[in-house]
Amino acid sequence: MKISKVKLLGIMMTALLLIGAAVGCSDSGQDPTKGKGSSELKGAITVAGSTSVQPLSEELAMAFKEKHPQVDINVAGGGSGAGIKAAQEGTAEIGASSRDLKPDEAGSLSKTIIAKDGIAIVVHPQNKVNELTVEQTRKIFAGEITNWDDVGGKSAAINLFTREEGSGTRDAFQEMVMGKDTKISGKASVLNATGALRTAVAGDINGIGYISLGSLDKSVKALKIGGIEPTEATILDGTYKIARPFLYLTKGEPEGIVKAYIEFVLSSEGQKIVADKFIPVK
């Protein structure tokens, strides 16, 4: 009887050791990001605002969802003004802006720069003009220069295209090109999205407008401004002056899945996506 008890005790001890070893192996093989891993993150995020930031947000959201399939990220446009308001009022977890905040907008908003971008002044590819000065650009959009032959092109009326009030691209263009005292001409056709403005210029041989550098394609031609071509290199070295940040805004410091998403955007993986068309910040 004593022998059987000893044997039973030995068997029990062996079983406990095997269980402990199995648990140890399981722990050592865990994802080091547990608590942040795909099986742990659940919920929904709305990112709303700038239409310049929107395509980038859509790509970032898709990449994040591949890692965390139980998180839904809804991306919407509306303009930077709408994005700032959505973040302030909490109607979106993240507001997207393609311009910096004005002093009266900051309040309790937490700001994260996710990328940098240039604003390209664009014309139809067949337009003979390849370069303007900042002053010429300002006078064209103010309606003071109205014919292409005044800036080296053929004799034809200049057709202006601009973004709507509240657009971050328009606000940045107004600040960096037009200045405080010069307004964009009321004769300019107003478009409500970056893509729509690009399409309008692409379809008008005498048109001119401004779009995000990241939205530039062969359907339009980017002009040199003051002899400087808008590129990543010229924006980084500061020689191309018409540049602005892309911002994510949250009401207070980001937490939970919102924090995890923003951390992903700023990670090497996220910034690699940014670098495809825009200028990474890390």
Image (cartoon, grey):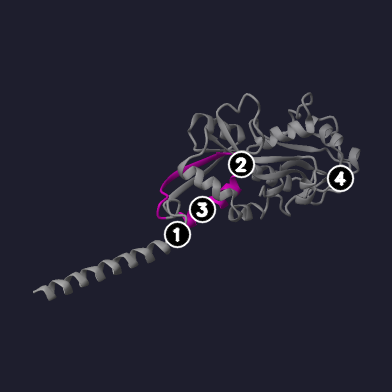
Q: Is residue 45 magenta?
A: yes
What's the distance in space between the residues labelled 1 and 3, CA to CA? 17 Å
Secondary structure beneath disc 1?
A: loop
**The residue under label 4 is which amino acid type?**
Glu
Q: What amino acid is at disc 2? A: Thr
Quarter-of-image position of residue 194 = top right
> Which badge, 3 or 2, comes first in the chain's sequence?
2
Foreground disc of the pair 2, 1: 1
Q: Position of residue 137 (x, y in %)?
A: 83, 36
Residue 51: give its label: 2
**Residue 6, percent across and down?**
16, 72
- Left of 2 or right of it: where is 209? right
CA gap, disc 4 to disc 1? 54 Å
Q: Which residue is mark 3?
A: 64
> Would residue 213 appear left or right of 258 to someone viewing this image?
right
Q: Which residues are magenta?
A: 39-68
Label 3 secondary element: helix
Which comes sooner in the sequence, label 3 or label 4? 3
Reading the image, the residue beneath label 4 is 131
Q: Which residue is mark 1?
A: 31
